[in-house]
Image (cartoon, grey):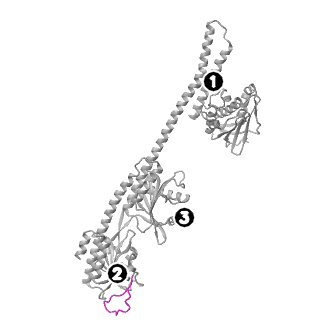
Amino acid sequence: MYQIIRRINLGVDVHTALGVLTQGVVDVVGFQVAAISWLTDALDFEIVSVAGREDARAELMGTRVSLAEMEVELAASDQSGSLFFLPAGRLGEGVGGWIPDLSDVTRGPGQWEGEDTLRCLLSSPEGELLGVLSVDLPDDGMRPAAPRRELLEMYADLAGLALNQARRATALEEQVRLSSAVQAALLSTEADHDLGSLVAACAPSFSSVLQASTFWVRIIDQQNPGHPGEMAGVPTGTVPAATAEILAHAAADARAAWDAGVVATAFLRHGRWVSSTSPWNETQERIRVVEGRAGWVRRSTSESNPVADEQTDLTEFLESIGVSRLLMCPVGVGPDCFGYFVACRDNESGWSAEELEAAARLGRHLGQAVLSVRLLERERVLVQQLKALDGYKNDLVSTVSHELRTPLTSVVGHLELIEDAMTAGAVVGSDAFEVVHRNLQRVLRLTDELLMLKRIDAAVGSEPGILDLRLVARDVVSSLQPQAKAQGVSLRLAPHGGPVLITGNGGELERVVLNLVDNAIKYTPAGGLVEVALERSARFVRLVVADSGMGISADDQEELFGEFFRSTNPSALALPGTGLGLSIVRRIVQRHGGSIRVTSAPGEGSTFTVRLPLSHTRDG
């Protein structure tokens, strides 16, 4: 007995200590079979040490009995201190487990029966039920008297002490392991990662903390929850190929878990998946066993429920990846859930309260890291946009300065010539005044188009109304007929059967038609044709402006709608223009929910097609 106490106090391995205790019960107390079972986190009694007969050891070792089943037998037993004796036949069909064959033994008063069951509770000093010491087949064949029962209780007290110390030591070791592992894991989230690198960096360390056989982490694509988003797994490359439905379902579960402040777990029990949720600040309650006669046990306040039948796609997926236990922890910060990570185990080991708390801590810290990465990404995008805006501003100033300098220089030069001529008393010809007038018109046109761009960008304009695009096109064609005739270009509006009503800003849409037709006339040589047509479908109207002019190269078409873009074609470049007309057209069309495209080739003319949505108002 002294050696047993000494070994327990020295902190010897609990399995070794329990083995010595069961062997002591066999050798000293006098039973042919002694077995110790401890209470698992799943509230099952698992036999972990058997001494005595080999046939009993082979059948009993590793078997489990649920707390509920054990409680039924203890409630029916006769109690003496920590001993519970269940006589044969009291429970009708008897009890399970190993039953010796005593058919050849002569029975008498006080004789041990084959189905007799004697158990001694193993408890902590606080009265918590930690396990059970079971004995069978006393050496003398008799039900034990008081002296033997007292000796058996002494061994049970030592076994309870061993289990209590082992549990405390295990809990302390686990706390130390988790603390250091979590600190190391958190370091993996502190580097300046992009989102993909962050996910890949944290997966191995998080998996190590939770001692998972398979692990993966996913940051959800909020716009498409069925899309994988950013994922990484351990072992590397082992992210399960889940369907879009499963991914969307998992995203919804993570959102619900984050809102509820819980970590979700699931495990296989008797071939059926059971799920439970554990609060981040989970507490445990004391449950009395046999109305307190057998002490009490700890039970989590989390609820367990069978996985719903409609989730068979999810359970089949879990079975396909070969896991029996699963933990899913949401990842987020504040009210926002960004994703989740999943830790799987392929054994019977469940998740301790300390592990659930560690998982929750990792989920919150990773959520903070994801938020930081997204803020950095947003900051980088803003910096790029500001740089682009600064470049655009510089280009705009440079281009506008150039566009203004050229005509104004010409104006100043000709005014000086006029002044010199007038000083000398010479007659000033009309050509000089025409040059001044033409260049000032160019300046006014540029100023007008810059102001138009500003109004469009600022979304400034009159309230939209219902207008007939057919009438707009007719008026524009009529106003540009003199210009077309002066250039020897035929301008024609294709007939259309009735009104074409659209909702929009009349002045802006008139500018669209005006710019397109004006360009078509400008870049079409004498003898050419410009045709304007309207094509209507059920939901849209198409404004088509086609010309037989010089055409546009494929390279120029890629930049055609940019501000201040002028064609690289020397013939087109020789004609006056600001390079803003088509940019204005595109912006107005987009503001009205439409689109514009061009079909062209050098020497084959150009066709611009504007598509705009029809008004919901009936137009007859």
Residue 129 falls within the magenta-colored stretch: no
Dot placed on the residue nearer the N-terminal end, 1 or 3: 3
> Is 140 left or right of 585, judged from the image as shown?
left
Magenta: main secondary structure equals loop
The residue carrying pointer 1 sits among few (fewer than 14), some (14 to 19) or many (20 or more) residues within 10 Å by Cα, namely many
Q: Residue at x 58, y 23 (%)?
A: 404
Q: Residue 392: x and y, percent?
A: 54, 33
Mark 2 element type: loop
- Which disc, if any, is residue 442? 1
**Cα gap from disc 2 to disc 1, whole angstroms:** 109 Å
Which residue of the protein is positioned furthest toward the top in this rendering? 425
- Which disc, if any, is residue 77? 2
Q: Amino acid at mark 1?
A: Arg
Dot in front, 2 or 1: 1
Is residue 210 visible from the viewing direction of this image?
Answer: yes
Please report the bounds of the magenta region as a residue range: 98-114
Q: Residue 7: x and y, percent?
A: 25, 72
Is residue 333 visible from the viewing direction of this image?
Answer: no
Q: Amino acid at mark 3?
A: Asp
Mark 3 element type: helix
Q: Nearer the viewer, residue 91 or 441?
A: 441
Image quarter of residue 531: top right
